[in-house]
Amino acid sequence: MSTVNAIAAPSATEPLVRATVERRAVGPRDVLIEIRYAGICHSDIHTVRGEWGKVPYPLTVGHEIVGQVTEVGTEVTKHTVGDRVGVGCMVNSCRECDNCRAGHEQYCLKGNIQTYGGIDRDGTVTQGGYSTHIVVDQDFVLRVPAAIPYETAAPLLCAGITTYSPLSHWKAGPGRNVAVVGMGGLGHMAVQIAVAMGAEVTVLSQTLSKQDDGLAFGAKHYHATSDPATFKELANTFDLIINTVSAPIDIAAYLRLLRLDGTLVAVGAPPEPLPVQVFALFGARRSFAGSSIGGIAETQEMLDFCAEHGISSQVEVITADEVNEAYERVLKSDVRYRFVIDINSLR
C-alpha cells in the first residue's frame, strides 16, 4: 500500500479538499501510473453531489486520466515503464460474461468496476484520477498515441469514447445526416468525430453563441433550439441524433427530427427521468436508445482514430486549487470545452 496526494469530496454539500488516498501495492498484472492530467467530467459533479445515488464519502473522483507508467508487475506484457497511458471510466470487469468476452466490458453483466466509487477486487472503494498516482490492472490501461498531447488526451478517455462508440455503432459516415445536441464537453467531441467519419453534421444548441466553434470543428449547419422554427425546419431530417446534454429535453420534439428508421441516442445523463411519447416513435419507425462508454478495444480504437485525424479535446488547464471554481463554471456552461487538472499542482 502507498499513500498519495489527492482531491476528495468530503460530502455532497462541502467543497472538494486536498486529501490523501491509499493505493494498493503493484500486483503481478498491475501497472503503476504517475498521473499527469485528469479531466473534469460532468459525471464527477453528479456523483460527488449525490445526484446519482449513494456515495461512499470521502471520495476522489476523476475518470479521464493520462500519465506515465512508472512500475509494472512481474506478469505485465502490455505496458512498460515510461509508456504514455490512460485510464477511463472502468478499471476491471468479470472478464467471463458474454458481454465481456465480446469486448464490451462496459456492459459487463456482473457490473464493471468503476474507476471511482466502485468496489475493487480487494473489497476497497476505488478512488479516481484527481490524485498523483493510480494502480490499475494492465488490461484496463490504454496506450495514448504520441501525436496527442497529454492534457488534450485526458478527456478522450470519457468524452471521446462516450461519443465515438454510438457514432461508430450507428454507422455515422458518408451519406448520413448526424445531429449533435449540445455544444459542450461531449458535444464538441461528437462533432469532430462525426465529421472525421464522413457524416454531414448539424449542431443543435440552445443558442448560437458557439456557432463559430461548431463550424470550425467541421459542422455544416448550426441551429438554435430556443427558436421554435428550428423544429419545423428540420423535421424528418436526420439519420442519427446524439444527445449530449445532461438536462431534461423534450424527447418527442427531437424524435420528430429523425427520418425513417432514424435513432436518437442519449449519452448525456440527467438525474431526472425523460418521458417518451410513443406516438413520436410510431411516425417513422424511429428509435430512442442509450449508449455508455466503449469497451477497452474500442477505446483504444478511438484513441488511434483521434491521433490519425488530428482530433483532440479543447481544454482549459487548471490547478488543484481551482477545482471547486471549475465545478461551478461547468454548471454554468462556462468552459470551452473541458477543464483538465494539472496534477503536478498536487505534488
Image: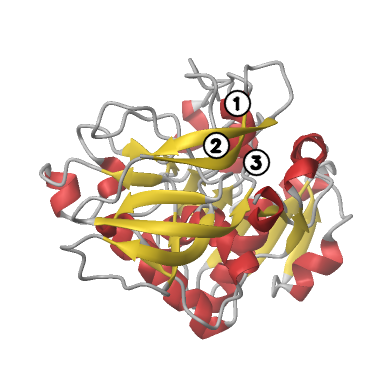
Say which residue label 3 marks: 245
Q: Residue at x 84, y 62 (%)?
A: 211
| Residue 320 seen anywhere in this rendered image of the structure | yes
Q: Which mark is residue 61?
A: 2
Of callouts 2 and 3, the N-terminal one: 2
* Figure check: 270 above or below 82: above
Q: Secondary structure at mark 2?
A: loop
Left or right of residue 194: residue 101 = left
The amino acid pointed to by label 1 is Val
The amino acid pointed to by label 3 is Val
Is 255 or 22 nearer to us in this picture?
22
Q: Where residue 68 sits: x, y (%)?
A: 47, 67
Of callouts 2 and 1, the N-terminal one: 1
CB atoms of marks 2 and 1 within 8 Å: yes
The amino acid pointed to by label 2 is Val
| Residue 234 seen anywhere in this rendered image of the structure | no
CB atoms of marks 3 and 1 within 8 Å: no
* Figure check: 42 above or below 165: above
Say which residue label 1 marks: 48
Q: CA distance from mark 3 to mark 1?
A: 19 Å
The picture quadrant where one finds residue 10 is top right
